[in-house]
Amino acid sequence: REFRFRKETNNAAIIMKIDKDKQLVILEEEHKDISPDDLKDELPERHYKYEHDDGRVSYPLCFIFSSPVGCRPEQQMMYAGSKNKLVQTVELTKVFEIRNTEDLTEEWLREKLGFFR
């Protein structure tokens, strides 16, 4: 909730991971000011300022889900189950999934957010 309702207007991100042994989702890193391109570099093999075409500025809370390629089926099930629970708990509406972290670009994110104009 603290992250969701923060007052800053810069782009921020939190990176969470699954602790397989404890079967918990844990906070791995928090970034106070980060671009989509820099975020891409932080993700493993992993609040965005959105300027509308009409000049309006909004700060949508996005959840970008990525699971490591090639992980075992039981781990993929843990990722999928954790994703659903987190989306429900935090009441997220802008949920995007990405398979290849190289695809996480400013253009990709703007395209995804264009649906929510």
Image: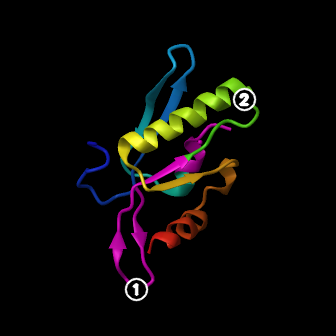
Q: Measuring 39% from the left and 50% from the top, which residue is drawn there?
A: 12
At mark 2, the secondary structure is loop
Seen as rendered, the residue at the extreme bottom is 54
Residue 4 visible in the snapshot: yes
Residue 34 coordinates in the image, percent (x, y): 44, 52
Q: Measuring 52% from the left and 19% from the top, which residue is drawn there?
A: 23
- Report the number of numbered marks: 2
Residue 27 sits in quarter: top left
Front-most of residues 38 and 48: 48
Q: Is residue 93 left or right of residue 68?
A: left
Q: Quadrant of the N terminus?
A: top left
Disc 2 marks which amino acid? Cys
Q: Measuring 74% from the left and 26% from the top, which residue is drawn there?
A: 72
Above or below 9: residue 1: above
Above or below 54: residue 2: above
Q: Which residues are magenta?
A: 39-64
Q: Quadrant of the C terminus?
A: bottom left
Number of other residues with Cα within 10 Å of mark 1, as a class: few under 14, some 14 to 19, many 20 or more: few
Task: Please name the residue that numbered disc 1 is placed on.
Answer: 54
